[in-house]
Image (tube, rainbow, N blue to C red):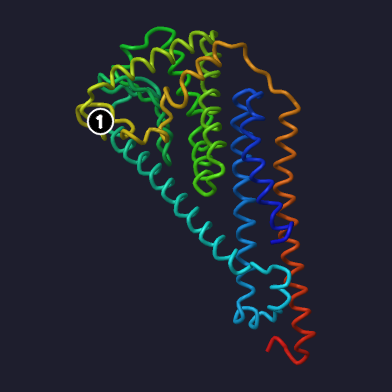
Amino acid sequence: MGPSFLAPLVVSSALAVAAPRLTRSMVPASAARVLAAAGVVAVTSWLGALVLLVFTGLGQIRAVADAELWSVWYLHSQEPFGLLLATLCGLALLAGAVRAAQVARRRGGVLLQAWRRCRALPRSGGDLTVVEDPVPEAFALPGLLRLPGRVVVSTGMLNAVEGVELAALLAHERAHLRHRHHVFLLALQLCAAACPLLGPLAREGGYAVERWADEEGAREVGDRTVMARALGRAALGRKSGGRGGSRPDGPPGAGPPAAGPPRGHPEPLLPATGGPVPRRIRALLAPPTATRLTPLLAAALLVASCWTSLGFAASSTHDLFHTAKQVYVLRHPTAGPG
């Protein structure tokens, strides 16, 4: 395997490792955008390199090479492990596609189930829906087709968080809807499913999305400590309220029709207590961060390097097969397309 094929794999791996560290010195909104973009670019570069390796290996199959007038001898001399690598890369592509399909199916199923249960519930005012449930729950339900998004909160959460802290919590959820954070999370999780190396990047991206909504909620009430207290109360209330619950697979709302995320699959619905809550609270209690230019430029350089390395690998593959065709014609002068 030549350096041109290795480069996209190495650079995309470097981006997957470096991006979460680089974004820690950025404001949450910038960090979420950079991580989502880095994930898409890295997985594109990674999968693109695998596709090129599969193509190179398939070109060494005698029947394929003879049909396309490629010299198997030349291809094998340049890529001696082409067929073996093609098999391994093909299996990796198939596994990534299966994992990504499973993620998309699971998230879509949760959203559809929640929307079916929410559809019959009356709105409590504007985009707010309150469900009768002693378990403290609050989450953003993204819009579906022509259906607008909703902020769903249980009576248990209304009892656990009150006043300005409740206002901060609701502002947090509305920030999720306003900025379409479910799209960020879906992109990150699909990237991690297609390429497991992007798992840490996806987790850091999920944290950045929650922090983005935290800062929006804090800005709405004018006090970051209020947002921190709201998160703490919501998390403690949910933990104590969830003990002894008899609905391991049911959503909030004991009576029909219930609304909320099925237990075990809360991520598509952007719950208020999503992500590492203690880390979010510490960030809110610390002085706000400002985006530094150096990490932003470093991330942009890695992203550009991913695209450049993939383009160079694609160009090298084209040159490889062009030369293989010329060698074939020289070794078989009477060969022709017909």
User: Is residue 8 or residue 33 the one in the foreground?
Assistant: 8
Q: Is residue 126 above or below residue 220?
A: below
Left-right relation of 120 to 94: left
Foreground residue, 216 or 178?
216
Which residue is at the front of the view, 170 or 143?
170
Q: Is residue 159 left or right of residue 170?
A: left
Left or right of 130, for residue 174: right
* Image quarter in which the N terminus is found: bottom right
Rendered position, 265 above or below 72: above
In the rendered image, which residue does mark 1 sit on?
A: 258
Q: Give the amino acid at mark 1.
A: Ala
Percent across and percent down for residue 269 are 40, 32
The x, y position of residue 78, in whole percent, is 73, 69
Residue at 20% across / 31% down in the picture?
256
Report the number of numbered marks: 1
Q: Residues within 10 Å of mark 1 (few under 14, many from 20)?
A: many
Image coords of residue 318 (percent x, y):
73, 67
